[in-house]
Amino acid sequence: MFLINCPYCGERDQQEFKAGGEAHIERPKQPTELSDDEWAEYLFMRKNIKGVQFERWNHSHGCRKWFNMIRDTSNDEIKAIYKMGEKPPSQ
Amino acid sequence: MTKNLRVKSSEYIDETNRISFKFNGRTYHGFKGDTLASALLANNVHLVGRSFKYHRPRGIMTSGSEEPNAIVQVNPGTNRTEPNVRATEVEIYEGLDASSQNCWPSVEFDIGGINNFLSPFFPAGFYYKTFMWPASFWEKYEFFIRHSAGLGKSPSSSDPDIYDHRNIHCDVLVVGAGISGILAAKNAAKNNFKTLLVDEKNELGGSTIFENNEFNKIDNKTPSEWLKKEIKELKNIKNLEIKTRTSVAAYHQYNYLLARENLTDHLEAKDKKNKIRQRLLKIRARKVILATGALERPLIFNNNDRPGIMLSSAIKKYSEFYGVACGSKNVFFTNNDSAYESALSLYNKGINVEAIIDIREQSESKIVKKVKEAGIKVYWSHTIVDTAGYKRLNGISIMKLSNDGTSVTGSKIFISCDCLGVAGGWTPAVHLYTQSGSKLKFDEEKQIFLPNQNTSEQMSVGSCGGDFKIDEIVKNLNQKLKDNLNIKETDLDNIKVEIDQENSKRNIWLLPSDKPLGKTKPFVDYQNDATAKDIKLALREGFRSIEHVKRYTTTGMGTDQGKLGNMHALGIIADTAGVKMGELGTTTFRPPYTPLTFGTIVGRNVGKFFDIFRRTPMNDWHVKNKAEFENVGQWKRAWYYPINGETMHQAVQRESKAARESAGILDASTLGKIDIQGSDASEFLNRVYTNAWSKLAIGKCRYGLMLNEDGMVYDDGVTTRLGENHYIMTTTTGGAANVLGKLEDYLQTEWPELDVYLTSVTDHYATASLCGPNSKKILKKIIPDLDLSDENFPHMSFKEAKIGNVQCRIMRISFTGEHSYEINVQASYGKDLWEKCMEAGQEFNITPYGTETMHLLRAEKGFIIVGQDTDGTMTPIDLQMDWIVSKKKYDFIGKRSLYRSDTMREDRKQLVGLLTDDPNIVLEEGAQIVSELNQNPVEMLGHVTSSYFSPNLNKSIALAVVRGGKDMMGKKLFVPMENKNINVTVANPVFYDEKNKRLNV
Ligand SMILES: [Zn+2]
């Protein structure tokens, strides 16, 4: 159970949060222009890395805000947390 | 009668408080402060159990949580009974009843004991090799194994005790209150760190508290005296919380630890009442200081498991702390100096020590000299080759050890004794350290695993960090505290320590005997009866990984997780395979460190607190009117209202008819309600629903279907435009929270430019749904001044009104196909609204109906229920709801997926109506549908999703999903059941009032 530093509320227990999959996958602005393959790439393909991964998290039992997290999935070390729309901090 | 072996008064034993307790049905006496183990030993009882596989008699071996043998069932036959409890940890109280666990029919006469003589047939992997075949026999094997080798019994009635959870946040958590833990906690707290100190024992001080080696001095006092003074000072320190009888069970990442605080287990039954028995502490610590100490290692030699063979340190603790002599003729067997301390402890109390067998060639330490001066015979370079005695040790045979330690020479000497103290050196208790994810390194010189790579803010101090001598402990602890806590001065700066310097050690993992290994029984894991022979066999059979050897031989897999024998298992594997210990790695220590009760884990979350119930404001009325309830998510919803002993079917038929013939009323408060405001609210709805919303006039309602991005139906409901920038959305009861989450997700992450605010108001409103041809008359009675004409208040529109002084929102919408109104009031007026409707509707025989009737009525109309008629694989097209999918809108969630090749297939499962040829047969929901009965294998076309007997149509109706069903109108299909085939015909899913005339009746 890790501690997550919500950018809006501060440090809270993991229980208050929900993981939301890979980050920085933008919904296509013009879906109708895409081929089936291109749309499928957006819709289904996720990386699921062992190691450093960019993720979306939601403070679902707190402020309900979404934010981004860089986490090492092999040891659950949280490398960085930053707000939606922000660029990942350079490491 | 047994003799009393209480030899000395101890300040930890209250001899004025005599306690009687039962063990295996016999009454014994002990004193307040005794553990079950110390009290039994004082009564000269060593035999406490039988081993798991061979049923060999076993005795108390240790004085702590590492005990492998003395595993007892406490208070058997009561609802407080608990299996797998270590006698060394049970504090006795008046009325305690305990019994041996692993023996049948009794510990003295054990049928399974014959396994001991059959032992050549019980090699490593015996269970795997024998009981695996044939598989059908497993039940018989299991019966036999469980019966003759009981693993304790769980209570048969519910637990009467109360359990609790507590969250603790602290700067520093210190685990273990031995000398290192106490000094660490004291200095942390003094430097303004909020500190928690926990220890599994009832007294602070660890083993130093009875450390009276005269050659070790702290500030010119014995360590024991000095530490007692330190403990007294703890009381006056601010910022320090101390919890005894508290065992840390798990150490998770991010310094999150779980500990069990034991509050009443040491009290008699009458004092346990109404008190919390155990409390689970959920601890978040900025820094964790592990001071968990070290466990003494046994030595592995032939027949090293007889009752009376104990750890040397345990004998010392029983003598010094409990005032109990474990035997009257004692011998020690050692590879280091610590056995000499135990020997002196007994000698100083006038207890006979026959000899010390030392596998070393010599030792020059002061304590060894002192022992020799006392006239105790020391056999250097000797080893025990065998022991004698069945239910109690009565002697040992020793021989001279060869220089390389692999064989014995010379003649055998027999020494008679009734107690043997074994000292094989010390293993740092690194269990919690490794649980945290931190890594160990093997120290080839000390032959121990030591903390190496810390993964969190932690430090290991004292003997769990590899410091065994008091001078090292104090010096290294001082430095670690300064480095890790950033403090400049500590109490430890000025402590003067003198120690007995010499401390040589000779490590031999498996001691030789004059007999070949195959003819000996050197036990490595006492609880699971794994011998050195088994481990070697596993290696011969090709097992190499330590994890595999462990599972194959069951070494380390007992309730003690092999706290005593794991190191020897590793050592024997390394020696046999010719590799270094460090290369072998160690097995994983998993939580809990000591077993936890289920009660502690669940805490207060039992019975009605197991899960949250949500009840509507009208709930009391439903209960009073004898409604049956069903669970919908966490909601308790009225299901149907039986009267005069009606069955569910009878009640639902009556309710359904009444709703269509006159008036019905449904508690719809559980529907999800989301308040949507903002200048972009219309645009937002356009993007999340499949249909168009921009042109919806204020005061109008519209049904909407929401998809996932993959094009599959996710939720549905009616949304009403309350104002220019204000909507109220309803969702399904079960989907409310997820819909809100999904909408927030899009709003925050994909469309942050939209000016929209979402608020869940589900619990803020109570909703009564009034339906039927007389619903208008009833509403008129409640709100006389509201114009209910179709011109002013048509279907799919909304009015705000007042019932008395209570503001309400009324939507004229219908889920039944009848003329109906959904009336929403503030939740606190819900019951009042309901009662007003019932009163006004009395003359029309208004009938309350529950969820079952609601389902039936909507099925007559062919309205879907998301989650019942859909399952996450249905598009709106599959549901034959093409009309709700806007062709004009450029985009909405899921739109692109509706044009994927797979979602456009013509042979997808599609929603259809089904009518049985025999109108009285009601199909089973979930039943499969086929077109051919004689195919092999038969092709499944789909299944029934909703099915009812319709009282209004007087026939059975069903909804189903059928592959290519859209084009099958009128086609004959079959529903094959266990003992009959039902003939059905595909039909229009709208069974009732296809032209929607009844909406305006
Ligand atoms: Zn937050």
Image: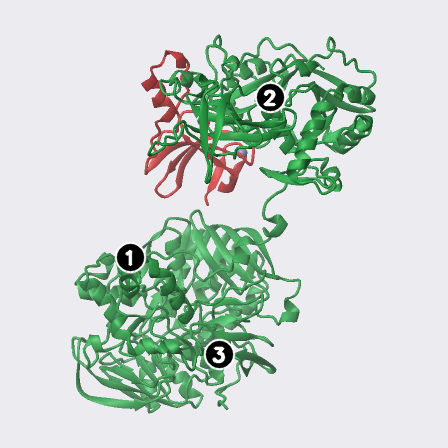
Chain colours: A red, B green
* Amino acid type for the residue under numbered disc 3: Ser
Seen at 75% across and 21% down, the residue is B775
Q: Give the mark toward the camera: 3 or 2.
A: 2
Check chain identity for marks 3 and 2: say if they share one: yes
Seen at 49% across and 18% down, the residue is B880
If you read the primary sequence from the N terminus, does the residue marked by circle 3 or circle 1 appear first? 3
Label 3, secondary structure: give it: helix
**Disc 1 marks which residue?**
B547
For marks 3 and 1, give the CA distance.
Answer: 35 Å
| Within-10-Å neighbours for mark 2: few <14, some 14–19, many 20+ | some
Q: Is residue B174 left or right of residue B664?
A: left
Check chain identity for marks 3 and 1: say if they share one: yes
* Amino acid type for the residue under numbered disc 1: Glu
Where in the figure is residue B492, as x and y percent of width and height?
A: 45, 63
Residue B928: in sight, yes or no? yes
Seen at 52% across and 35% down, the residue is B924
Foreground of the two, A19 or B317? A19
* Amino acid type for the residue under numbered disc 2: Lys
Where in the figure is residue A91, as x and y percent of width and height?
A: 35, 32
Looking at the rendered structure, which numbered label has been put on residue B638?
none
Task: Note whether B20 is above or below B903 in the view shown.
Answer: below
Q: Is residue B823 left or right of residue B225?
A: right
Where in the figure is residue A54, as x and y percent of width and height?
A: 38, 31
Foreground of the two, B274 or B542? B542
For marks 3 and 2, give the CA distance.
Answer: 77 Å
**Disc 2 marks which residue?**
B861
Q: Quadrant of the C terminus of chain B?
A: top right
Q: Chain of mark 1?
A: B
Q: Are marks 3 and 1 in contact (CB under 8 Å)?
A: no
